[in-house]
């Protein structure tokens, strides 16, 4: 079974959403983890917009990459430039993939505007995750 790590700066939004989508589309064909260079806690807007898409990430934890130093990943996906630049060396020969997404947590506005911003990033991440699973884990189309 393929092991996938999704890495971002704080493991609060983008990597958490990607973990949710990869698990959903992977349907048990892969083990998916997410982590950050730091741990900032799970963002409540990320939880809400994923639940709006019927993907429950409420039990995810915000972890640092150090927690997974002993796992040999087949794929390490960085979802922000900071994570790509500061990604530690992990054991094994996992394929590194970088796909940067805007950080919705940096968006300022009303609660409704923040939800719209998070939803847009969620949808970008969903498209990437669908394509990733389709090309690397199992054919979905």
Image: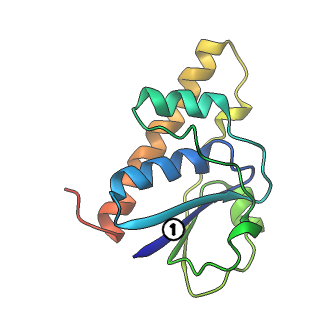
Where is 77 relative to 61, above or below? below
Query: Is residue 41 toward the left or the right of residue 22 in the image?
Result: right
Q: What is the x, y in percent for residue 129?
A: 42, 54
Q: As drawn, which residue projects farthest toward the bottom? A: 92
Query: Is residue 105 toward the left or the right of residue 60 in the image?
Result: right
Residue 101 visible, this orientation: no
Query: Is residue 83 toward the left or the right of residue 130 in the image?
Result: right
Name which residue lies at 72% across and 55% down: 63
Where is 107 relative to 15, above or below? above
Q: What is the x, y in percent for residue 6?
A: 58, 60
Residue marked by disc 1? 4
Residue 6 visible, this orientation: yes
Where is 56 relative to 101, above or below? above
Q: What is the x, y in percent for residue 118?
A: 57, 30
Q: Quadrant of residue 43?
A: top right
Name which residue lies at 40% across and 67% down: 30
Q: Quadrant of residue 72?
A: bottom right
Q: Secondary structure at mark 1?
A: strand
| 10 Å crowding of disc 1: few (<14), some (14-19), many (20+) | many
Name which residue lies at 63% across and 21% down: 114
Which image quarter holds the N terminus? bottom left
In depth, the one of 20 and 119 nearer the eye is: 20
In depth, the one of 96 and 5 nearer the eye is: 5
Q: As drawn, which residue projects farthest toward the front? A: 59
Q: What is the x, y in percent for residue 57?
A: 53, 41
Which image quarter holds the C terminus? bottom left
Query: Is residue 1 toward the left or the right of residue 100 in the image?
Result: left
């Amino acid at each position: 079974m393929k092991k996938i790590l999704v890495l971002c700066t704080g493991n609060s939004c983008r990597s958490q959403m990607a973990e949710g989508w990869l698990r959903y589309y992977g349907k048990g064909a892969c083990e998916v983890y997410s982590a950050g260079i730091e741990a900032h806690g799970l963002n409540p807007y990320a939880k809400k917009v994923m639940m709006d898409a019927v993907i429950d990430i409420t039990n995810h934890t915000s972890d640092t990459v150090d927690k997974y130093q002993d796992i040999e990943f087949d794929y390490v996906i960085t979802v922000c430039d900071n994570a790509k630049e500061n990604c530690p060396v992990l054991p094994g020969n996992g394929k590194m993939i970088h796909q940067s997404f805007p950080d919705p947590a940096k968006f300022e506005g009303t609660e409704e505007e923040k939800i719209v911003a998070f939803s847009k990033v969620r949808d970008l991440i969903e498209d990437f995750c669908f394509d990733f699973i389709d090309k690397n884990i199992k054919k979905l189309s």
